[in-house]
Amino acid sequence: MLRLLGSLELDARSFLLGLVSGLLLFWLLSKFRPLLADGIAALRRRVQAARREMMAGVEARWAGEIIRLAQGWHLAAPLFSLEEILIPPRLLAPPAAVEPGLPEPNRDISEQVLPYLPDWPELAAVYRYPTITLAEALSGGAHLALTGRPGSGKSVTLAHLALLVARKDPQAGDLAGHTPFLLHAADLPLPRDTDNLLDPLVRALQHYASSLTASRLPRFVESTLAHGQALLLLDGLDELPGEQVEVVVQYLGEVLQQYPQVRCAAAGSARCLDGLTALGFIPVAVAAWTREQQRSLVLRWGELWAKYIETPPVDPAVITGWLVNDPILLPPLDLTLKVWGAFAGDLPGPAGRDGLQAWVRRLCCAQQADDQTEARRTKLQALALQSVLARRPVFTRREAEQGLIQASGSTAEEPTRAQDPAVEAESQTLETSQELTPSQRELRTLVESGLLVKRSGGRLSFAHPVLAGFLAGEALGALHTAPAEAVEALFAQAEWSGKDLGLMYMPPEMLPQHCMQKLLAGVDQDPLQAGLFSAARWLPEAPENAPWKAPVMRRLAACLQDETLPEGTRARALAALAGSRSSGGDLLLRRSLNGGSDVLRRLALLGCGALQDSQAVEGAVRVLGEPGVLLRQAACLALAAIGNKPALEAVASALLHGDDELKRAAAQALANHPEEGHPALIEGSTLEDVLVRRAVITGLQRLGEPWAVEQLKKIQLEDEQWLVKNAADQALEEMDKANPRIPRPLPALENTPWVIQWAGEKGIGVVPGRPAYNLVCSAAKEGSRTQRLAAMRYLALHGEEDAAGLLLDVYRQERGELSEAALQALWILSGRGFNLSPN
């Protein structure tokens, strides 16, 4: 190295020139470095602004796509947009959580007399159980699993929220700044065949998007999820059998783990919650429609029908009077189809299935002559039965073609151009080609008529699971070969909506006696009486002479009268009896008013009110003079629900002349009757009797509507009596508080105050994991009342294998509130797949 340096010759001039150049370059860099940094930052900002502008453009286009999609996300989309016909959906508010060490929330009068029945929400609708919107329910931060029978309005609930969020409507609350992604579970191409986690989600969303928007979705979806601005609204999970639900839930868990800030609501089944609760989902039932909401739909439909379609064949007032006078509250699907058939003039009868009959016939006749309608219907029935028996609610075009070929009686397979699955996925080929086979033409016509809908990847499904179940049930009745084997094969399936609907709509005489005996066997040992209440859901569609109907009705009556059962089980039996459309139920309830325990009489009162039984008015009025608080509350609510002149006069008399407790019950009951009760409350707020005015405040507070709030503020300012002013002030203050019924995610056990307190009482610390879980189990057995209630709430959502036995012990050994809480927890555990059979 030294020899190398020694051989170098340095020219003084070159050295000096290099030195000066280096110093000059250094000075220039130091001088212009801030400008260079500013230039780079400006360039970066311009790039980011361009990206934001591009994303904003995609976001705007996607908002338009979602609005268009949601407007057609309902059964009557061929006639009206969703907003034109919408009855704003609501959820049945879960009971307010009891937190040890904190004041217990007030309970509504309906909550005091009627247990929480998420699987039988019809009674809750009659008595105006507390409800919340989906936006309110999501404001607590928990993911939600919307539960309810097929046709209860879960899809419309999700679509309505998608509309609000896409338009940044204030009704969406804190979700207004999010981007909604509305999709059907059947459109997710699962299992995932790529390493890209979001690929199934993007491909499902591209199924709904225009080609311009679809190409931009991959980056847009990833960016929205990464920034915590995504609202995922997943429909159709309740339509899939359990094995397919498991695949979707597994994928959903992967997405939520990678993007934990995503907000999510899914239409699920109360029978298949396993996996969802582990992801933080809380089951919340969709509320049934009230009588006023049903009346609103009928009136709105009549206006739109006359405006857009034609003059109804019968006076709209006659149609409306016939439809709204039915005391049985119909699910949204049933009522929609019944109203549609009534205004179209093709409704064959008043039964629930008659609306379905008219709908299917209308769509089958849409594009062909009447003499071909039955042939098409027969093919549809065979395709539906094939789908249900195979537990494949979503099927390929090839499978659908084969089903149609077999239904037509052909033994040879028709040639088809879509033998290759890759070719089969190209749906446009089959839709535009002129060289179609008969089965392909038939399939295309079924899609165009709306009986079948296209899914991603070229797959198909029936337009609604109730449609598939109805057609499958008809197919069972039309079978000439081995019908009993088909029924038994369906009966032996694991629970899912296809099985339940197929059995409900098949001819009642086809159900083998031993199958019904098997369904009802062991219900005395089952805390949920699952078999009995499954059969009870079939009662409204079964004729009086159905061989199994009388035994089921007797079982329900015995369940209602069994004093050893929790109120929740007996109230479910009441709801089933009231909704059965069977003769003798009203007589049983009237007789129960005159004898038996207070619980039985209270439930009988509520049943008479639900049936609007005018012959029960006299017995309910007698109860108003008895001392029991809950009995008198139930009598007031029942009389307001019956709603005839003698019943309402009795409630008004209780408001004017009863003791203070009865006055409050009467005022709160009048809040349930818009036509007569609401004016009575306004008038009562001006009467001289101070106690009447104070009682009226409880009725106005219960309503919570804008006009009722204004009336409370008026009383607060203008009433001269301190007692009344103070009551109005307290009511307004209570209404301003956060709703305690909003579902909220449960914190980690080591961060839960009551668990820490319980551990302190035991003289130990809270160690995360199994030790903390064992603390919860011990609290469920040995804690105070509030600690046991809180522990059972946790075990319902996150309990492990030992939770079922522990809760069964509480259910069997306790009475009253603890037994009811154990029953509700067991109901959720059953949906999570736990075995509740006795040891």
Image (cartoon, rainbow, N blue to C red):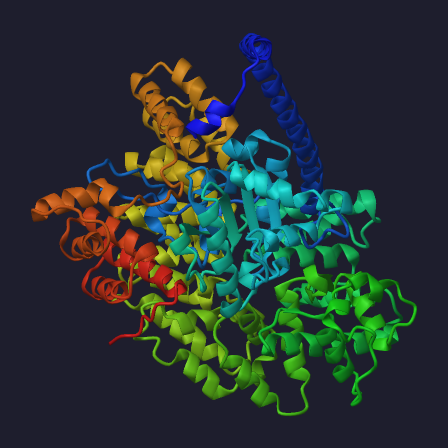
In terms of depth relative to the viewer, which is nearer, 105 or 552? 105
In the picture, measured across the screen, residue 517 lies left or right of residue 478, that is: left
Residue beneath the point at 88% across and 69% down: 368
Q: Measuring from the top left, give residue 470's x and y in whole percent.
A: 64, 71
Residue beneath the point at 35% across and 53% down: 115
In terms of depth relative to the viewer, which is nearer, 418 or 520? 418
Work out which residue is located at the far bottom of the displayed protein and give it. Answer: 481
In the picture, measured across the screen, residue 67 lies left or right of residue 306, that is: left
Q: Measuring from the top left, give residue 24's x and y in whole percent.
A: 58, 8
Work out which residue is located at the far left of the displayed protein and give it. Answer: 763
In the picture, measured across the screen, residue 662 lies left or right of residue 207, that is: left
Residue beneath the point at 42% across and 50% down: 638
Find residue 372 and report its image quarter.
bottom right
> How many numbered marks are there?
0
**Is residue 440 placed above or below 248 in the rendered structure?**
below
Q: Quadrant of the N terminus?
A: top left
Q: Quadrant of the C terminus?
A: bottom left
Q: Measuring from the top left, give residue 369's x and y in whole percent.
A: 89, 71
